[in-house]
Image (tube, helix red, strand yellow):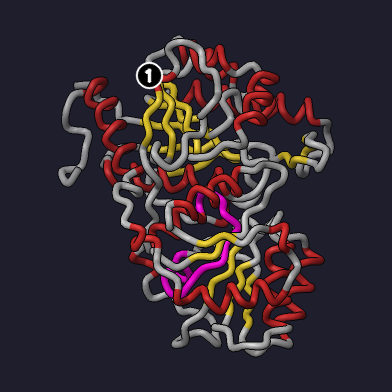
């Protein structure tokens, strides 16, 4: 047997929000728990990746950050160089890291060619090696017509056909198919594997994390806009409901997110000072204790939050965004039609009475598990099983933990 130990490299472009990073981190953390000698390295452009804790044998390489402007263009997050120079630096770091790390599996999150094609050279170089190339897609990408136009413009189809060995869809096919109505080249569809959603658990180290006052012993509604960069309207809507309520509501704990605009965050914090039962937290990288302790959840509908809603099995009101992508709205519509949660369309904002009525009803709503849908949360187990087969093919037996 080879003395080499298995390695996985994960690419996450992270131009906006927390979604890509948190999904990749969840996969990495689970895999090192299942394989006792595995090392996982995450390539990320997230400016806050260092705020998160990682298990032993998981590490990251921080590539220069970029942000997406309202007009759809990208600009460097911090560097005073143009976007083309920034992308050239990022591409060079990605390719050099892949060459030196020499992974058994290279997983690319969501963007088949990376941001503005920055991972294409790495894919082509690794294709000449024994590395297994995997594209990971969330359950919903966007409206099919919009996704088709985007993929046509980016010319991703040759990479799907000629470079990638497998395509993992992080969801069950019978709820959402991200490539529905997308004309795929011959040979691509057989590469697709639907994993189910990625279960999240409360880490043992966080089970004794105190809930902030005044909610230590009282039921509360957790309000989370994810990263917060596009959650101002949702949070404002909830705040208006508490400010003008005509009926009792459970207390609210609002976690704004690290990308909430500073002026909006300050405004919400000030308004909460005048509400005895609304508490605001700017950001926590460890939201699991608050999810576990909540009576119910109000969320926007991003992929990771949806996985957490299902994992912690809380009655949920989803207020999905509709721009710049309809991804959240599509996921919310499918989830509501499956009986997993309730949806309040953002186009009804800012009617405070409508939100107050929804918040009043929310704690009595059924939990997602009561919808009776099986095999929703098998994603990490199925990914681990597939990785095991790849490692067994390359190394033979002996690389797995005995409990796998």
Q: Position of residue 40 (x, y in %)?
A: 41, 38
Residue 153 appears left or right of 35: right
Quadrant of the image occupied by residue 171 = top left
Q: Report the residue at 72% width, 39% height from top.
A: 66
Residue 299 appears left or right of 312: right
Q: Report the residue at 68% width, 24% height from top.
A: 149
Q: Position of residue 113 (x, y in %)?
A: 60, 23
Q: Assess disc 1: are there few (<14), some (14-19) or many (≥20) residues with their C-alpha within 10 Å of its C-alpha.
A: few
The number of numbered discs placed on residues in the rendered structure image is 1
Provide the secondary structure element on which disc 1 rests. helix
Q: Nearer the viewer, residue 26 or 192?
A: 192
Q: Report the residue at 43% width, 75% height from top.
A: 293
Looking at this view, name the residue that lies furthest to the front. 337
The part of the chain drawn in magenta is 288-304
Q: Is residue 204 above or below residue 337?
A: below
Image quarter where the C terminus lies is: top left
The residue indicated by pointer 1 is 190
Q: Nearer the viewer, residue 331 or 118?
A: 331
Q: Report the residue at 64% width, 16% height from top.
A: 155
Q: Residue 169 colored magenta?
A: no
Quadrant of the image occupied by residue 399 = top left
Q: Residue 293 colored magenta?
A: yes
Q: Position of residue 109 (x, y in %)?
A: 52, 34
Quadrant of the image occupied by residue 69 = top right
Q: Is residue 130 above or below residue 313?
A: above
Residue 28 appears left or right of 351: left
Q: Nearer the viewer, residue 238 or 277?
A: 238
Q: Is residue 129 above or below residue 151?
A: above
Q: Position of residue 156 (x, y in %)?
A: 60, 18
Image quarter where the N terminus lies is: top left
């Amino acid at each position: 047997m080879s003395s080499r130990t298995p390695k996985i490299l994960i690419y996450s472009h992270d131009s906006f929000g927390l979604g890509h990073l948190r999904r990749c981190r969840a996969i990495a953390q689970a895999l090192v728990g299942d394989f006792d000698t595995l090392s996982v390295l995450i390539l990320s452009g997230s400016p806050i990746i260092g705020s998160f804790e990682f298990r032993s044998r998981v590490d990251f390489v921080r590539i220069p950050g970029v942000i997406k402007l309202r007009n759809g263009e990208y600009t460097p997050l911090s560097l005073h160089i143009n976007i083309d120079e920034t992308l050239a630096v990022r591409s060079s770091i990605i390719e050099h890291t892949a060459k030196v790390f020499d992974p058994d599996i290279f997983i690319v999150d969501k963007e088949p060619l990376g941001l503005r094609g920055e991972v294409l050279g790495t894919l082509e170089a690794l294709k000449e090696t024994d590395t297994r190339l995997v594209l990971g897609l969330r359950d919903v990408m966007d409206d099919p017509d919009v996704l088709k136009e985007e993929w046509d413009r980016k010319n991703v189809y040759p990479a799907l056909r000629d470079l990638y060995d497998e395509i993992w869809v992080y969801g069950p096919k019978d709820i959402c198919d991200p490539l529905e109505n997308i004309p795929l080249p011959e040979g691509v569809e057989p590469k697709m594997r639907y994993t189910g959603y990625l279960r999240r658990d409360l880490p043992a180290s966080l089970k004794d994390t105190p809930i902030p006052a005044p909610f230590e012993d009282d039921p509360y509604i957790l309000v989370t806009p994810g990263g917060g960069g596009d959650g101002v309207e949702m949070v404002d809507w909830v705040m208006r409901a508490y400010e003008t309520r005509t009926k009792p509501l459970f207390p609210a704990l609002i976690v704004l997110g690290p990308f909430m605009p500073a002026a909006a965050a300050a405004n919400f914090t000030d308004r909460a000072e005048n509400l005895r039962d609304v508490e605001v937290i700017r950001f926590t990288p460890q939201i699991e204790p608050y999810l576990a302790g909540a009576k119910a959840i109000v969320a926007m509908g991003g992929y990771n939050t949806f996985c957490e809603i299902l994992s912690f099995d809380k009655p949920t009101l989803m207020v999905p965004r509709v721009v710049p992508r309809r991804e959240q709205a599509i996921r919310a519509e499918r989830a509501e039609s499956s009986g997993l949660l309730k949806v309040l369309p953002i186009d009804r904002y800012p009617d405070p009475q409508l939100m107050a009525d929804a918040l009043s009803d929310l704690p009595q709503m059924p939990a997602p598990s009561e919808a009776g849908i099986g095999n929703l949360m098998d994603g990490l187990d199925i990914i681990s099983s597939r990785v095991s087969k790849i490692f067994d093919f390359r190394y033979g037996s002996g690389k797995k933990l005995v409990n796998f």
